Amino acid sequence: MRVRGRALGRVAMGAGVVGLAVVSAAAVAVPVAGSQPREVGRSAIEPRLVVDRAVSPLSRYRAYFADDLYDAPLFTIGDLAGDVERVRIAALPFFDGSEFTAVAPSGYTPLRFQHVPSALAVSGDGVSATLTVDALEGPWAPLPGELGGVTFGGPRATALVDSFYYAPQAGIAVVALDGGVAAGDAFTASAAAAPDIDLAQAGPSPGAAAVPADLIPSRCATGSRRRE
């Protein structure tokens, strides 16, 4: 009887320990699960894939002139500090010989996107602004200049922290979530204002290159006439 009593005591004690472990696990798991929505992790996308799959920024830009979007504000700017004259939405840093594109052609090094640390070193006149998305669509996030730091607001602020990527070499940012930016997303960015560059500083036009005269056959020279 004593043996059976001791065995039952051990069983009861073991059940109590298991029950305590289950209760403790539930107490820890509930707040963690509540603070980290599972759908955020599933909707995150590699930033390079986002750019490769995205509609060209030029095509997206032309779509904003459609009747239903012509008068719709793309985003609003608030809490402005400094001289902001331009807001960059996207860039086309590659030229494949026939067109400019956001996707690296064969033989080019693709853009390298990174999460933004607490601050990036920038040079130039400092500016800051809060940009709140309205009708803007696609992965491109609006920026007031060369990014120095960014914080997020709106209903998706937590998701934006994990899905915001920046490519310093091109000065562009993307939101790596399905659909990209959404109405209500807010970006408070500190940056260096883009410098003013006139056409002379931008270099010669790609179409202005001339072929040396000695390489042009006489029959192809301007003003020549074909002999009968």
Image (spheres, grey):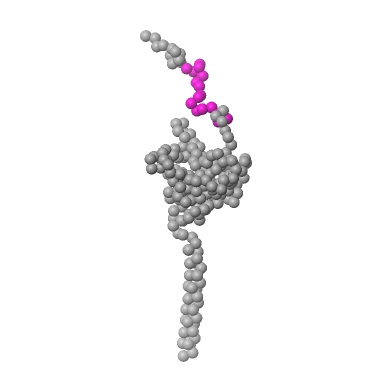
Quadrant where the C terminus is found in the figure: top left
Question: Which residue is at the far left?
Answer: 228
* Position in image of residue 49 (x %, y %): 45, 46
In the rendered structure, which segment of residues is drawn in magenta? 201-216
Q: Residue at x 51, y 27 (%)?
A: 205
Q: Quadrant of residue 71?
A: top left
Residue 45 visible in the displayed image: no
Q: Residue at x 54, y 47 (%)?
A: 78
* Position in image of residue 80 (x %, y %): 57, 46
> Eyeballing the image, is 197 above or below 45?
above
Q: Nearer the viewer, residue 109 or 121?
A: 121
Q: Residue at x 51, y 44 (%)?
A: 142
* Position in image of residue 185 (x %, y %): 48, 51
Residue 128 visible in the displayed image: yes
Residue 89 falls inside the magenta stretch: no
Q: Nearer the viewer, residue 123 or 169?
A: 123
